[in-house]
Image: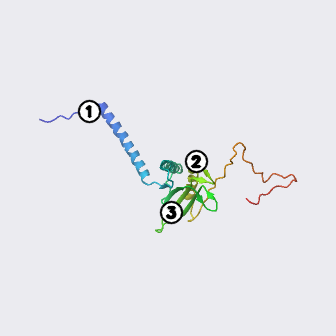
């Protein structure tokens, strides 16, 4: 005796098509996210406090992902980020970028960020700002081995008084002549 195939009611068939279509879209989105996660920029935070290290790594990776979304393209291969306590050159820097080549000839870009400048601890927002500046310089850079410094002005310890303003270089002096700033 032949077995009769059971037919589903029309509502079930409609539900099945809708569910399958939604599942397929969700699967495509998940695959897209996994592809994006596979090729990530390595971020190393060189501090001993484990909780702060993980928090900074997570925030910097989020910032890099948002930056990629904003510019509409992925960051170049060979890019790495190192966060350290201070960066000392002839003066302390908030960040710098080293651009060069691997021995095999592929491009290497290393972004260095400082957690502290001139005794002042940088906030996460300031680190993200420096990271964005350095990433933009890497994307637009053509010459290898370039150091691009970023400086942070010191904050006055007396917060009640506003920072003094520099005189306008084009304003006239008491004797009528203009001040010319030859240092800048």
x 39%, y 42%: residue: 26
Q: Toward which corner of the image does residue 86 lie, by quadrant?
A: bottom right
Q: Residue 79 in the image: state x and y as whole percent.
A: 50, 58
The disc placed on residue 108 is 3
Task: Give the secondary structure at mark 3.
Answer: strand
* Quadrant in the rendering for residue 161: top right
Q: Residue at x 61, y 54 (%)?
A: 117
Q: Which residue is mark 2?
A: 123
Residue 12: image quadrant is top left
Of residues 18 and 69, which is closer to you in this image?
69
Q: Where is mark 1, residue-wise?
A: 8
Mark 1, residues whose alpha carbon is within 10 Å: few (<14), some, or many (≥20)?
A: few
Q: Nearer the viewer, mark 2 or mark 1?
A: 2
The earlier-in-sequence mark between 2 and 1 is 1
How crowded is the residue under tag 2: few (<14 C-alpha within 10 Å), some, or many (20+)?
Answer: few
Residue in view at x 50 percent, y 58 percent: 80
Along the line of sight, the residue nearer the viewer: 16 or 38:
38
State which mark lies toward you, 3 or 1. 3
């Amino acid at each position: 005796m032949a077995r009769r195939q059971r037919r589903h009611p029309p509502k079930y068939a409609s539900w099945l098509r809708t569910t399958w279509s939604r599942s397929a879209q969700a699967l495509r989105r998940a695959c897209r996210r996994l592809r994006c996660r596979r090729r990530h920029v390595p971020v190393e935070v060189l501090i001993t406090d484990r909780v702060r290290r993980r928090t900074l790594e997570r925030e910097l990776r989020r910032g890099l992902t948002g930056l990629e979304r904003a510019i509409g393209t992925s960051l170049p291969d060979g890019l790495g980020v190192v966060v350290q306590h201070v960066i000392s050159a002839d003066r302390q820097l908030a960040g710098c970028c080293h651009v060069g080549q691997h021995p095999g000839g592929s491009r290497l870009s290393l972004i260095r960020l400082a957690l502290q400048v001139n005794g002042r601890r940088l906030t996460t927002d300031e680190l993200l700002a420096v990271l964005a500046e350095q990433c933009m310089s890497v994307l637009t850079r053509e010459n290898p081995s370039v150091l691009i410094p970023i400086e942070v002005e010191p904050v006055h310890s007396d917060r009640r008084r506003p920072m003094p303003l520099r005189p306008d270089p084009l304003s006239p002096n008491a004797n009528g002549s203009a001040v010319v700033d030859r240092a800048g």
